[in-house]
Image: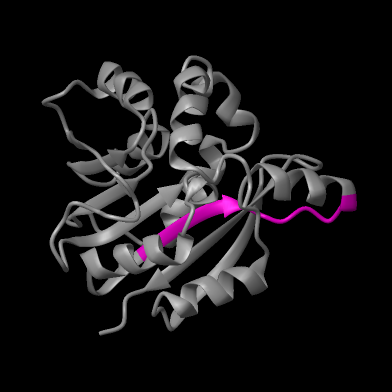
Amino acid sequence: MGILEHKGRARIFYKYLSQVYDRINPFIWNEAMRDEAIGWLELDGDEKILDVGCGTGFATEGLLAQVDTVYGLDQSAHQLEKAYAKFGRGGPVKFHRGDAERLPFRDDSFDVVWSSGSIEYWPNPVDALEEIRRITKPGGRVLIVGPDYPNNTLFQKMADAIMLFYDEAEADRMFREAGFTEFEHHIQQARPGSPRAITTVATIPE
């Protein structure tokens, strides 16, 4: 388990990262990648959507171009403060502070659950994926973006020491163990040589 796959350490990390997150993020996960991923959801505008690990609201902002309201959840108070500054506390985003492994929502609450840049910090990703499956309606869609496992041996050792990086085979295992049966993976990259993202789009069994 990487050093940041610990909830307390991750909160401390984001206390400082939140100050520069919106300036750093586009080098790894940019608007073009975000919008491409949103396109895979084929939204019609009526969906009830939850953004798990919403952070400062980068993905939330893209989702709001498609629907009127988005629910956003994050464990970091510092990240949420940045999101409040963007959207307000009573605006189109309904914010919740919470844990991906214990989502504070009833079964079958959402049509779509999105999470980008969060799974790598989850100590128990299968547990969190099970929770996401629980709160998503049958036939609903789930989209998870995480860091693709690097090819270089040195980078692999560094990645393993920091947080969860995973390849398609590991993504298959996690999603199957969480009860998903229908899903596909996409590799996204901001530019040649930059870190790759692995984006999984899954459908909740009927």
Residue 147 in magenta stretch: yes
Quadrant hosting residue 44: bottom left
Q: Position of residue 185 (x, y in %)?
A: 57, 68
Residue 206 in view here: yes
Name which residue lies at 63% across and 36% down: 28
Q: Position of residue 12 (x, y in %)?
A: 47, 25
Quadrant hosting residue 59: top left
Q: In the figure, 168 relative to 44: above or below?
A: below
Name which residue lies at 56% across and 19% down: 23
Left or right, 191 with respect to 105, comes to right
Left or right, 141 with respect to 150, comes to left
Region of the chain picked out in magenta, as a range: 142-153
Name which residue lies at 41% across and 74% down: 178
Left or right, 88 with respect to 31, comes to left
Nearest to the observer: residue 86 or residue 20: 20
Q: Position of residue 82 (x, y in %)?
A: 35, 19
Q: Position of residue 131 (x, y in %)?
A: 30, 64
